[in-house]
């Protein structure tokens, strides 16, 4: 079966669209996870703020 040039380019375009859509979903998912991580870290830090000013410095150095 011979490939129709136009049909082939449509297939290429569809595959590229699928790749771009998947990449977009990955980026959105990664951003969502990072926001959740930062929120949770902030919550932990806020809960221990009574430990004083050096707490964040020590935490940053230790992690």
Image: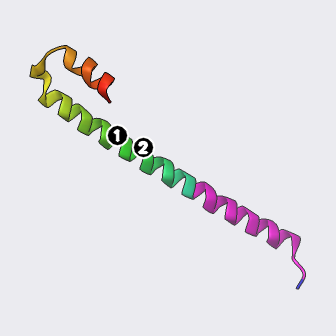
Give residue 35's position: percent from left, percent from top.
34, 40
**Looking at the image, residue 30 lies above or below residue 63:** below
**Looking at the image, residue 30 lies above or below residue 41:** below
Screen quadrant of the N terminus = bottom right
Q: Residue at x 43, y 51 (%)?
A: 29
- Magenta extent: 2-21
* Residue on which the image places disc 2: 31
Q: Residue at x 49, y 47 (%)?
A: 27
Q: Is residue 4 left or right of residue 44?
A: right
Q: Residue at x 81, y 70 (%)?
A: 8
Count neighbours of disc 1 (C-alpha within 10 A) and say few if under 14, some if 14 to 19, many if 20 or more.
few
- Marks 2 and 1 sit apart, C-alpha to C-alpha, by 6 Å
**Looking at the image, residue 49 lies above or below residue 44:** above
Q: Quadrant of residue 49?
A: top left
Q: Which of the two residues, 40 or 63, is positioned nearer the viewer here?
A: 63
Dominant secondary structure of the magenta stretch? helix
Queried whether the magenta region covers residue 7, the answer comes back as yes
Q: Which numbered tag is attached to residue 35?
A: 1
Do the residues bearing badges 2 and 1 touch, measured as CB atoms within 8 Å?
yes
């Amino acid at each position: 079966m011979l490939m129709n040039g136009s049909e082939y380019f449509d297939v290429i375009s569809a595959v590229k669209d699928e790749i771009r859509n998947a990449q977009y979903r990955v980026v959105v998912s990664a951003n969502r996870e990072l926001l959740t991580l930062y929120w949770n870290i902030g919550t932990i830090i806020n809960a221990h703020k009574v430990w004083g000013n050096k707490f964040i410095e020590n935490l940053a150095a230790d992690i």
